[in-house]
Image: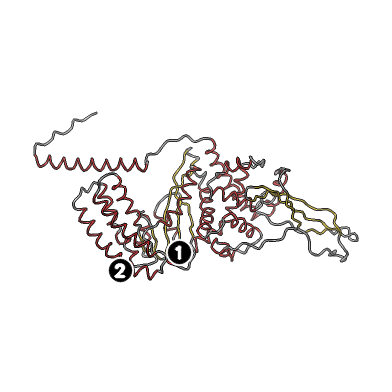
Amino acid sequence: MSTSPEPLTRDPIALQAMLAAERAENERLRQIIKEMQRHRFGRRAESLPIDQLLLGLEEAEQIEAEGLADEEAADPVKHTDRVRRRRANRGSLPAHLPRVEQIVDIQDKACPCCRGQLHVMGEDVSERLDLVPAQFRVIVTRRPKYACRACEEVVVQAPAPARLVEGGIPTEATVAHVLVSKYADHLPLYRQAQIYARQGVNLDRSMLADWVGKAAFLLRPVHERLVERLKASTKLFADETTAPVLDPGRGRTKTGQLFAYARDERPWGGGDPPGVAYLYAPDRKAEQAVRHLRGFVGVLQVDGFAGYKVLADRNAVNLAFCWSHVRRKFYDLAQGGPAPIATEALARIAELYRIEGEISGRSAEERRDIRQARSRAIVDALEPWLKAKLALISQKSKLAEAIRYALSRWAGLSRFLDDGRVEIDSNVVERAIRPIALNRKNALFAGSDGGAEHWAVIASLVETCKLNSVDPQAYLADVITRIVTGHPQSQLDELLPWAYTPAPLKAVA
């Protein structure tokens, strides 16, 4: 049922007010349209091909593998049974691959019973798939068996080396390559399987998923320790990004969140190494950040997300806000056409960034002193100028929104003036979020909440390796090997990327 419009008033003053309001609203809508055109905010409906649906299955298989690994750790009988079944079903490795033989032998070749000389009576031979850059090879491990001619029941053999996938074919380096390809190079497992098939190595996607699940289970304590060490800092960056997760009950995806917490003291010569930890949460509620940062006391540098204010209200965290986000809002307006106020705001903010470029790398004390001498005057003059301009423009305009965004966060935006450890923006953590966005673009979604948690665990270690100039392939291969062979849980700090030193190479017989 339609309703007729109300008749216009004949009062000239009222008509002028109505016209001004309509013009302001029209300008606001024009700005919104231009912004949408520039950033392509509109969502496109896409039908998911079968390859993308397989991603959900691989995440589910990873969760199953992690659960089985947990069961095997608690029940030796299940562990032995599954090792036997893997050996029976794994098939053979291609004959054309080069073989690198390792002999795991005993040191004492005297009979433990009569001390007579042992002789070789046979050996166990196992083959596992190994990977070096751009080349597959097969590691052949031989374990000779020794018997005593005088003592018929004596058989001596070196124990089999511990493995991440017992009874399976991959070496730890192969698993590390799969992890780096998926979480650093953004190659989903089904694409990796296609790449391996071109070399004549047929690895089923579900098998790769099994390896990833076991590795995530093994590396989880290292990730937890990384989070603890970052929270012990007095200055962190925080940001979050969406993590689409398959929701099987509804046949569609739901929107989870990956929170990123980063530390980088290099711009002011701090003593703690850089690092980033991702934590998955099913939503973006403030309680998620509160849970993640429980125990953290210090400065948290963030964008304008209101969820972090809950932490500040508890007096444990001081929020420092991001000038890059403020600048971006004025930049969008200036790009849309003549905008003298936005252009002037950009020029003033650019002067702050020019000063920051000059003092990067200096000590926290020097940075604070220079900011007090040069930057404070710019910030102190900018606040009343923004307030004065806000009073002159329509309160419904996008420019008014940009000004209010800055003024409502002024205390946090000014915090960098009094603390040389604080950056002018949160670009450090935004850079750490980009790999997650790339992975999301290629994979479209995680297959489950558990798959998203795997994403967080492994991506945290990979990206922290990058920040510390550590090769993630070598790091993951070595760390997985150390954990498998019994690295003490009390010494997890030695396995963090910034403390990592490669294990000494062992001679191959």
Find numbered disc 2 in the image and state the secondary structure of the residue it sits on: helix
Foreground: 383 or 479? 383
The residue depicted at 27 percent of the width and 62 percent of the height is 378
Q: Identify residue type, mark 2.
A: Ala
How far across and down, in percent of the image, does residue 465 sit? 53, 58
Q: Is residue 255 left or right of residue 162?
A: left
Q: Disc 1 marks which residue?
A: 266
The residue depicted at 51 percent of the width and 45 percent of the height is 448
Q: Quadrant of the C terminus?
A: bottom right
> Is the residue marked by circle 1 packed among few (<14), some (14-19), or many (20+) residues within 10 Å?
some
Q: Is residue 112 left or right of residue 136?
A: right
Residue lying farthest to the left in this orientation: 11
Badge 1 vs badge 2, beta-carbon distance below 8 Å: no
Q: What is the C-alpha distance between the residues marked 1 and 2?
A: 23 Å
How far across and down, in percent of the image, does residue 430 sit? 42, 54
Q: Does 41 appear above or below 471?
A: above
Foreground: 217 or 485? 485
Q: Quadrant of residue 308?
A: bottom left
Q: Disc 2 marks which residue?
A: 373
Q: In this view, does 366 lie to the left or right of 490?
A: left
Foreground: 438 or 254? 438
Residue lying farthest to the right in this orientation: 150
Q: Identify residue type, mark 1.
A: Arg
Q: Earlier in the sequence, mark 1 or mark 2?
A: 1
